[in-house]
Amino acid sequence: MEFLQTIPWDLILIQTLNGIVTGMILALIASGLTLIFGIMDVVNFAHGELFMLGAYMGVVVLATSGSFWLALVIATLIVALLGAALQVTTLRPLLGRDPLTTILATFGISLVLQNYALWQFGPVARKIQEPFTGQFTLFYLQYPWYRLVIAALSAAIIGGFWLFLKYGTYGIWIRAATQDRVMAQAMGIPVPWVLTAVFAIGSGMAAASGVLFGPLVGVNHAMGLDWVLKAFIVVVVGGMGSLGGSIAASIFISLLEAYAAIWVSPAQAVIVSFVVLILTLLFRPTGLFVPTPK
Amino acid sequence: MSKRDRIIYWTGFCVVLALLIAAPLVLPEFWRRFLTEILIWGLLAMSSDILIGYTGMVSFGHSAFFGLGMYGAAAALLLFAPPNLWLAILFGLVGAAGVALFVAYFSTRLRDIYFAITTLIFSQIFYVIIFTWTEVTGGENGLTFRRPALAIPGLFSIPFDSETLHWFVLAVVTASYLILRRIMQSPFGMVLQSIRENEPRTRAIGYPVERYKMMAVMLSGLFAGLSGVLYAIQNRFAAPDFVYFLVSGEAVIFNVMGGIGTLVGPIVGAGFFLLLREAFSRFFTEYYLIPVGIIFIAMVIFMPQGLLGFMRRWLNR
């Protein structure tokens, strides 16, 4: 049993924890993306920028009010409103056109938002102060409670959102619009506004994850792209349009990356998620975590 | 195409070509360089038009082909002394073709939006590899090298200056345009266009759609690699920034601005974008992408055919 002793079990446990925490954040971003894709047929290239703007709004509100939780709520609301405005001005005119044009439009939005953030906030990374700094001991490491709180909060937001989709009136409208847009319209559901609301909710979820994740990394204007790429990988691996699939895939990929980071540098650990993507495309192009299509 | 149309088309072609040949003789140094750059980016955009405009697949991964062309040229120019232009082109094309084979094999299994996302992720894979493999690629700093001479062994050899470089680039781009135009009018090109119009029906008629799509991606990647080689020769460096996804995004912007499915449209789009960038960066400095992005969004909504869209049918006849 020489072999077992060479495995760094303590590191693996720590990385499991880290992987679950980033996995939950990723799940929060990816479920917004999945929602927007599944319901609106829109691939939202600007999702990473909404995440980034959420983090910046968090920085601004935290600086003026001093309360992290207030910052979380207000940043989410502001970015949700911004998302609604963006949907009405740029995506609504594209309704009924080739879905590919929405990629182009949201790509344009992402360029504008990213450069706006650079212009407004400058190239220096900002920091969000954690709301509390308690730690517990894990082997030789002091592990901050805040990370666990992030994971729990993300899970709570996703869970609440799922309940809303399942039981809320608006949630039922959203599901109706997904199944058959024309029929939903005929039943008196204001479909264009449902789509706006969906985009707003997705944007708000991205913003919330931005604020929650802000304390762990610096907030800068280019942070969106890394995350939106990861979220795209997750959405493809999990099965496009499947909420449960993308959550499972988020945690799966984050865990793999965390384990890989024990042996190689974090920059190279990203390759792991690419490999997972390629293998998925080769052997199961419909997604790892959805039932096999008939 | 009727005889009259054909005369008008080739007259127009010759007039534009003559203007581009004469341009470096009258333009000052800055604009001469600018025009050469438009042609190089135009070639990149033209190559991606094969996918966007003719096959109906939006690629967000053209930076990988462009970048590998660049690094392939860099490898040839650094390994062989004295640096040889034709070896650079050969190495660049081989590099781009290798990547294109890889991307084509995996991403053509997917359609529409899925294709766009996977090409984007593939280009990011190559970006990460090039960025982290410092020993070979120079990492973040990239590679610098000397510019080769324009030479045909045994005949002549002259060093590039900005005028000869412009003419050389113009010759390559014009040749590429004529080749691609011919290919798009060939039976092969017609199959690609029928995939764009109706994929299930093309399959039902009996064409192996996947194989045609792979060939389209390969062809597109090859010409994108060629533009990467030209850019490397013009600027004498290769940097990971050019493998980054923003370059692919710009190629798509050039296409949409100029008009997809026209081959020349993307070159016009590249010129329009670079001019906008030049104009706005006077007022907005490095934030020029804010107004340019807004113009781009407006064009997607109100002018989906692009600047040359109105000539699309005519240019393809």
Image (spheres, coloured by chain):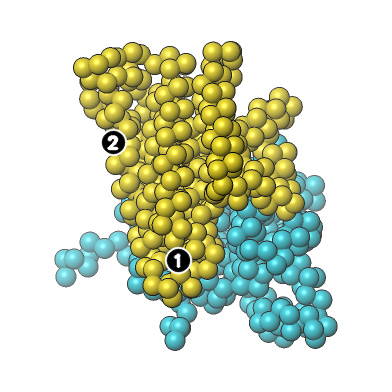
Chain colours: A cyan, B yellow
**Disc 2 with disc 1 on a shared chain:** yes
Chain at tag 1: B
Q: Secondary structure at mark 2?
A: helix
Task: Give me the disc on residue B288.
Answer: none
The amino acid pointed to by label 1 is Leu
The residue pinned by badge 1 equals: B110
Is residue A183 among what the camera can see? yes
Mark 1 crowd level (few <14, some 14–19, many ≥20, 10 Å Cα): some
Horizontal relation, residue A93 to residue B315: left or right: right
Which residue is the extreme one toward the front?
B3
Q: Quadrant of the C terminus of chain A?
A: bottom left
**Looking at the image, which is closer to me, A138 or B240?**
B240
Chain at tag 2: B
The amino acid pointed to by label 2 is Phe
Q: Secondary structure at mark 1?
A: loop
Q: Quadrant of the N terminus of chain A?
A: bottom left
Q: Position of residue B129 (x, y in %)?
A: 36, 45
Distance between the alpha carbons at the discs numbered 2 and 1 = 29 Å
**Looking at the image, which is closer to me, B172 or B96?**
B172
**Looking at the image, which is closer to me, B286 or B49?**
B49
Q: Position of residue B152 (x, y in %)?
A: 27, 21
Which quadrant of the view contains residue A87? bottom right
Q: Residue at x 65, y 30 (%)?
A: B275
Q: Residue at x 33, y 54 (%)?
A: B102
Horizontal relation, residue B3 to residue B213: left or right: right
Q: Residue at x 34, y 49 (%)?
A: B99
The residue pinned by badge 2 equals: B91
Count of numbered circles in the view = 2
